Amino acid sequence: SDLPVDAGTAKRPLSFIDLPAFDRDLSHTLSRAKDPVVVTSTDTIALKQLPNRLEKWIAAVDKSGGKIETHNIDGAEPATRSLGLLLSILGSIPQVMDFARDMIYSDARNYNAKIFYRMDSKGDRVMDRMELVRRTPAQ
């Protein structure tokens, strides 16, 4: 059929839950999405204490040569690729080699990650959302 691809499914945010079902959903969505894939959470997630499950996805992007950017949505800090902040996110990821072999993360290799955060009342950076943006192939 000549119907346009329904972009609505890709644009609906995927809500993070710390369960294997999230990995399956994200992997499936990344394999088919044309638009950025947005991950949100109903829980407050401090960037310095990301759930291991989320860290693995970010590390998979990083390990495959993807870019990881952090953006403050409040404008209280400039948009940054702050090495310190990224190292605090990536540096806490154990056993990168073990999970990198796991096929569920393979679709992350086509993506860059943008982590949007705000400052909470205690001055901690908390995740607003993560956007996984498909990389354009090098010319």
Image: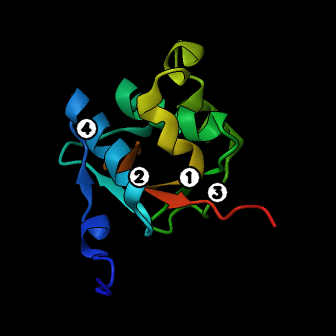
Residue underneath mark 1:
111
Mark 4 Cα within 10 Å, few/some/many (few <14, many 20+)? some
Residue 23 lies, in percent from the top left, at: 31, 35
Residue 138 lies, in percent from the top left, at: 78, 61
Question: How far is mark 4 from mark 3, CA to CA?
Answer: 28 Å
User: Can you tell which of label 1 and label 3 is closer to the viewer?
Assistant: 1
Q: Do the numbered discs 1 and 2 sit on residues whose CB atoms are within 8 Å?
A: yes
Q: Is 102 positioned to the left or the right of 44 in the image?
A: right
Task: Return the mark for residue 80.
Answer: 3
Type of amino acid at the residue the image marks with label 4: Phe
Residue underneath mark 4:
22
Q: Quadrant of the N terminus?
A: bottom left
Q: Do the numbered discs 1 and 3 sit on residues whose CB atoms are within 8 Å?
A: no
Task: Give the answer, above or below, for where 69 lies relative to 21.
Answer: below
Type of amino acid at the residue the image marks with label 3: Thr
Residue farthest front in this picture = 1
Task: Return the mark for residue 30.
Answer: 2
First reached walking from the N terminus: tag 4 or tag 3: 4
Q: Can I make out residue 51 in this image?
A: no
Mark 2 Cα within 10 Å, few/some/many (few <14, many 20+)? many
Residue 56 lies, in percent from the top left, at: 46, 29
First reached walking from the N terminus: tag 4 or tag 1: 4
Question: How far is mark 1 from mark 3, CA to CA?
Answer: 18 Å
Residue farthest left in this picture = 42
Question: How far is mark 3 from mark 2, CA to CA?
Answer: 25 Å
Nearest to the observer: residue 69 or residue 12: 12
